[in-house]
């Protein structure tokens, strides 16, 4: 495997898990006006980082010698 692609994939997976941990660690709060406030943007970001990690591992596998 190309080391650069492998490290990129590992970093993407680590960042995705960090997003999941940050989302799980934060509390959803209801504002005084009744609006729910939560960091929902971290969920699709973690999915995007997972997809990038898989693509990087596939690229590393395809470019192996």
Image: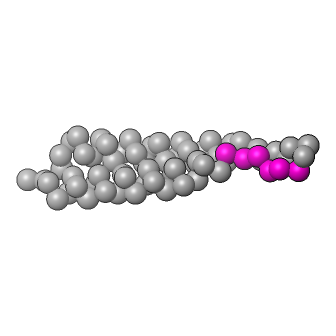
Q: Residue at coordinates 27% horizontally, 46% vertically from top-left?
A: 6
Q: Residue at coordinates 45% horizontally, 43% vertically from top-left?
A: 14
In the rendered view, tell whether residue 30 sits above or below residue 47.
above
Q: Does the magenta stretch include residue 26?
A: no
Q: Where is residue 36 in the image (x, y as percent from the top left)?
A: 80, 50
Mainly helix, strand or loop, the magenta region?
loop
The residue sitting at the right extreme is 32
Q: In this view, does 15 lie to the left or right of 9?
A: right
Q: Residue at coordinates 28% horizontally, 54% vertically from top-left?
A: 57
Q: Is residue 57 left or right of residue 17?
A: left
Q: Is residue 8 left or right of residue 49?
A: left
The segment highlighted magenta reads 34-39
Q: Position of residue 9 (x, y in %)?
A: 33, 47
Number of numbered callouts drawn: 0
The residue sitting at the left extreme is 65
Give the colour scheme shown.
one colour
Q: Position of residue 39 (x, y in %)?
A: 67, 45
In front here: 40 or 59?
40
The residue sitting at the front extreme is 33
In the rendered view, tell whether residue 57 sits above or below residue 39.
below
User: Which quarter of the picture shows residue 10?
Assistant: top left
In front here: 56 or 37?
37
Q: Residue at coordinates 90% horizontally, 46% vertically from top-left?
A: 33
């Amino acid at each position: 495997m190309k080391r650069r692609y492998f490290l990129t994939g590992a970093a993407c997976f680590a960042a995705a898990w960090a997003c999941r941990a940050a989302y799980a660690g934060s509390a959803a709060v209801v504002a005084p006006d009744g609006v729910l406030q939560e960091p929902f943007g971290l969920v699709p970001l973690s999915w995007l980082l997972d997809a990038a990690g898989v693509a990087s591992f596939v690229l590393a596998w395809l470019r192996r010698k």
